Image (cartoon, rainbow, N blue to C red):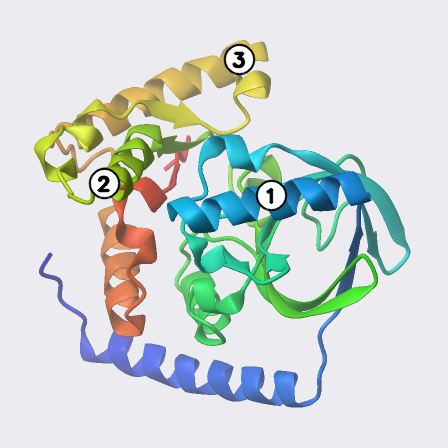
Amino acid sequence: MIYYINKHFQERILKLILSLSLFCFVFFAKGQTDTIYISYSNEVKEFFSLATSKALSQGILTKELKRKQPATIKFNSLIANARIRLKGDWTDHIKKDKWSFRVELERGNLYYVRKFSLQFPETRGGENESVFHEVLISEGILTTDYRFVHLVVNDKYWGVFAFEEHFDELLIENNKRIGGPILKFDEEGFWECQMMTKIQGENKCYEYPIFDAARVKVFNKKKILKDSVSQILFLKSRSILEQWQRGEVNKENIDLDKFARYYALCDVFQFYHGLQWHNQRFYYRTIN
């Protein structure tokens, strides 16, 4: 992709990056991060241990290893039951006796969020990832709440983890956007092919139309399908994304300015994780 960044935009972004980087340095130096406590049974711990061992042996965290397990979350005055699972696809989310989590609270919220990830900072952009998110916000680009927390699991300190909001209606509300579906491409075929590559020792994924065959999926599907208006919005947004998938781009249906800024910032930060099709998420803005 070729894009143009004018001098004013470039200078503004560089100044913002420097100021936010200084803030993050001072923030970490003073240790001003909250602590999240997770506790679960020995049976759950055994499941995670076996699942992570299998993931390390096969090189990928496959779907059957991500079964949700019961846990308790403590954060300040909040004590809530939750469903947690292993998070991630590659084994960079696994260390000895530690791993990344996806958490869904049964009640209450943390930072006005019910679903979130707790992951090793290095699986993203390290300390710079929070700066990246702040710059996205400053440019009016919809993004998740991203911050750093201390994590204690079963009374054992696991270190500083990255807290990242997951995708649901609270993401839209917290960012003061008009309600609309959040979509993605089904990545199951992609990971099946990656697993086949690990087994056979030869990458032939490029021979298959994995992206072309990927279905468009919506987050919070059960809730969307219960509401007639939400269903209509989903069908309309899915049609637009399927056109995008076929290379039939209608600029009237795409916010090209936001796309250009996002791609440019990914290049500035050298954060390319979010540019891969199976990592992209799309918000349908119902009102221009």
Contact, mark 2 vs mark 3 (Cβ under 8 Å): no
Marks 2/3: CA–CA distance: 36 Å
Q: Earlier in the sequence, mark 2 or mark 3?
A: 2
From the viewer's side, name the closer residue of 229 and 80.
Answer: 80
Q: Secondary structure at mark 2?
A: helix
Q: Which residue is mark 1?
A: 50
* Placement of 220 over or under 130, stated as above or below: above
Closer to the eye: label 2 or 3: 2
Marks 1/2: CA–CA distance: 23 Å
Q: Secondary structure at mark 1?
A: helix
Q: Do we see residue 251 in this rendering?
A: yes
From the viewer's side, name the closer residue of 283 and 121.
Answer: 121
User: Dot 2, crowdedness within 10 Å: few (<14), some or many (≥20)?
Assistant: some
Q: Earlier in the sequence, mark 1 or mark 2?
A: 1
* Placement of 56 over or under 181, stated as above or below: below
Q: Which residue is mark 3?
A: 225
Question: In the image, what residue occupies the spot 20% across and 30% down?
Answer: 210
Residue type at mark 1 is: Leu
